[in-house]
Amino acid sequence: MAEDLLALSALEAVEAIKRGELSAAELFSFYRDRAAQEEGGQEPLNCFCWLAERLPEGNDPSAAPLAGVPVAVKDLFCTEGIPSQAGSRILAGYRPPYTATAVARLEAAGATLLGKTNQDEFAMGSSSEYCAFGPVRNPWDRSRVPGGSSGGSAAAVAGGLAPWALGTDTGGSIRQPAALCGIVGLKPTYGAVSRYGMIAFASSLDQAGPMTRTVTDAALLLSHLAGRDPRDATSVGLPEPISLPTAEGLGGLGRNGPLRLGIPAELLAGEGVEPGVKTAFERALAVAEQLGAQIVEGVSLPHAPHALSAYYVLAPAEASSNLARYDGVRYGLRVEGDGLVDTYERTRAEGFGPEVKRRIMLGTYVLSAGYYDAYYAQAQRVRTLIVEDFRSAFSEVDLIVCPTAAGVAFPLGAKRDDPWAMYMNDYFTVPMSLAGIPAISIPCGLVEVEGKELPVGLQLAGPHFSEQLLLEAAYALEQALGFSGRQGWV
Amino acid sequence: MGIGEGRFEPVIGLEIHVQLATKTKLFCGCRNAFGDPPNTNICPVCLGLPGALPVANREAVRFALMIGAALGSDLAERSVFHRKNYFYPDLPKGYQISQYDLPLCRGGELEGVRIQRVHLEEDAAKLIHYGGSGRIHGSELSMVDFNRGGTPLVEIVTHPDLRSPEQAGQWLRLLRATLKELGVSDVNMEEGSLRVDANVSVRPVGSDRLGTKTELKNLNSFRYLERGLAAEIARQIKLLEEGEEVSQETVHFDPESGRLTVMRSKEEAHDYRYFPEPDLPPVQIDQGLIEEARAAVGELPAERIRRYEALGVAPHHARTLGFRPELAAYFEEALAEAEGVGPARLGSWVVEELAPRLGEGVEPLQGAAKPAAFAALVAMVEGKRLSTAAARTVLEELVAKGGHPEQIVAREGLEALGDGERLRQLVAEAIAANPQAAEKVKAGELKAIGPIVGHVMRTTKGRADGAAVQELIKEQLGV
Amino acid sequence: MIERAEVLHVARLARLKLAEEEVEALRRDLSEVLSHVAKIGEVAAAEVPPTAHVALAEAPLRADEPQPSLSREVALGSAPAREGEFFLVPSPQA
């Protein structure tokens, strides 16, 4: 019975509940108990920083679209009355008086909140090691990181502790952990999902998105997440409702017939992709061709190699401003000092971890007098060029395809002392974030490292509002690659 | 006056903050209300809670565009909000959402003073000394009330075109009247809905280079503005005359003592690290909104003043009528009904005689003294059928009870006495009754004529024309 | 690439109190990161307009209609220090 429940994708669970074969309460208890047990064990994954006690009282959710299926939510989403700390000590104990729109939409559709997942502090990180509540572990190999910053959500799904999860992606924080944990992660078009109630890291880049076992589940979750929110001036929603994907091949998905998948020349020529990743990627491309896709080599995104640098100017700059509100006046940690300025300085020094401090310092520097034009303004100009690069590329191909990350999950602690090495984890995901275009990562293979199998992710990116095409292409590939169902607890 | 005469002339620019009278705050739906219990008009957005996001208030944008239209500014088709970053307890997000290089309105002019820009920004919260006196010096703790935080402000910045404290005061009064008439703000300096900072420098008369300017902050009334400016100008002139230099500083004027204090900043100068507000895409101002804003701008005080002056109304009367649209409306109705009296005398009577007699908060047109009756009364004065003193008596009754001047005059027997035989006789009697005064007048002390005039006025119950009486007395006394 | 004095200046702007050990570590880390990000300077972009927003929305303007506010108790509930109806902070002038 337990294996049966565990094996159910979120959609299958919804259907089972609606058929009366399963109750929402039963499913909730099942996952809740698994999560609690996991966290109490040896070398726990440490995915959850808060777990719901029980299913909320109220109406029978089985009639609602999501039928009461539980969802794990990244801690940085505000959830009314429930701790929302964005992985930071500076928000220790903070319980917001309101719920983020993205979460509220899921709850309105009948999903129930299973728990809040652990993350890199304020979403700044690619390993989920910079958490106030301790690092998260990868279910595939507990000595390794799950990726970040949505590592808790990724590990929960991959570890069978939640049917699906909500994450956020600023420079790759959904896609990269999805790749390292062997699950599906989608970053929607910027503005598709409301940011109201998402504790902000970099406002022009942050987006919420689904982290799921299957592409179909991602489509289902996205269909309820997306929508214009009058409380978020940057939200536009999606022009068409998302439907569950059905594509059987890639031959007819393209604008003019076969789906044209472009391989970005400069990106792949640059930094070293690990051999195991390269092999898995090439095998996936072969499968795509068999499915009727046309692989187009050498698609130029000339400024993409500068994307990481531009990102690490723009994102910390916005973050340095977004995090100025954490001053101990109205909520969160306050460390009393000698007068106002000292109180500010001590509060923030004790409340923020080292990576957050680094980025605040970097961001403040690049905005400061004398440096603004060379750094911030220049990064904005490079951003324009990257937007243009993608626009131009999409006139030749339907989607861009590349590995999600250059390597598989690395050992805990391996990159903590080398900021730039850590930032390189985002090399393939950051260009899409800068352009605001949607991208999905799906598991495409396994690499054996020191006796453990570690997943590899394939990233597909498309023009603005091409989510449906991404989902269709990903679905067809997923079926052909035969990966769905092979999860980290097997 | 003393200032500006001699070797130096002052150069003054003003930065005015106007609190808009919208129903809600600039970026959230909390009420924009003065005087509500502390921390009751607050929400995640204006409290700067994690995850909250701003959404701009259309009415605030419309009001800002109206102000720009009234000042003859160029109205932007695309405008951007910026973040101004600094730490202070009254600034919950650690940044203020304001505008930088793409403000809503640019340029413009009001009565000879050029406008640089008009932009929107959110107000800070209120810091109160823990102890309640309202000032924050000398306390260890402060209390914060976030009600005011996030309310919409329009900042108006002028070019340094003002040349004296008096001119600055007059100009600011005109701006205030203009904004009041637009209906965009209460513009009450005591309540803080109109705030002024001044940039002041001096330079040798005839020079066109600008001297170093200082910033004079928080001038809470027109009087303080003028006095503060005068004091700072004098301070700068004295420095330069002593061979010293003026440093670019912030100066605080204490109206109680009349003293200026230079504020030495304890920290480095602010580096605000302005960058475009990522949570707010640029505001595209559609033509419809621009037209709405322009259409909402009726005749403004400056235009009205000019129009009345052109009609012949004395400048100081035109100015009062210009500043007070309700009086102006009354004046125009009276003018329309008037026969035998022109705008100059009518304007004078509205300002000098009617206005002071109306009660507090009485709308002139709603009062008992109707414009037609009023106009007829003033025509009687113009035609010398009624003395000024008698007319005032009639006016009192019109204001109190209404009616028509012809009837009141007839009933009370107030018809002017003119300068005929009867009046000459009364004058002679008055002279006889006041021999000492008469002697003094004959001796050349014309001031002593008062009691004799008063005697005549009393016996005629004010029906005599004071000027004519004086002439007759002088004639009879041979002076 | 970045001097110690600049690190301290930036820390002050950002209201971060740095322990002595942190200053040097940050100076090193920031210098390293800056040496990488500074490469954006190699991109010829003088004529390129900056992108401040990839948002595909025009800024929606909100109607001037009051919405419910938070209750004072809820708002003050998270305050680290309060006095009756107010948030309490060290005085800026102290």
Image: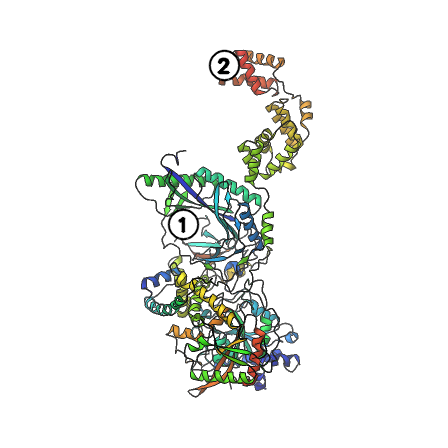
Vertical relation: B313 (above or below) A395 = above
Q: Nearer the viewer, mark 2 or mark 1?
A: 2
Chain designation of label 2: B
On the image, the x and y values in percent for residue B30 come to 56, 56
Quadrant of the rendered image containing residue A127: bottom left
Between B349 and B288, the one lying in front of the other is B288
Vertical relation: A280 (above or below) A367 = below
Tag 2 near tag 1, CB within 8 Å: no
On the image, the x and y values in percent for residue A317 come to 43, 64
On the image, the x and y values in percent for residue B71 come to 53, 45
Does label 1 lie on the same chain as label 2? yes
**Looking at the picture, which amino acid does disc 2 mark?**
Val
Residue B360 in view: yes
Q: Earlier in the sequence, mark 2 or mark 1?
A: 1
Chain designation of label 1: B
Secondary element at tag 1: loop
**Looking at the picture, which amino acid does disc 1 mark?**
His
Quadrant of the rendered image containing residue A473: bottom right
Residue density around tag 2, few if under 14, some if 14–19, many if 20 or more, within 10 Å? many
Pick the quarter of the image with the N terminus of chain B.
Answer: top left
Between A103 and B77, the one lying in front of the other is B77
Q: Mark 2 to mark 1: distance in Å?
A: 63 Å
Mark 2 highlights which residue?
B441
Q: How many numbered callouts?
A: 2
The single residue placed furthest to the left in the displayed view is: B243
Mark 1 highlights which residue?
B137
Left or right side of A124 for B477: right
Q: Residue at x 36, y 55 (%)?
A: B268
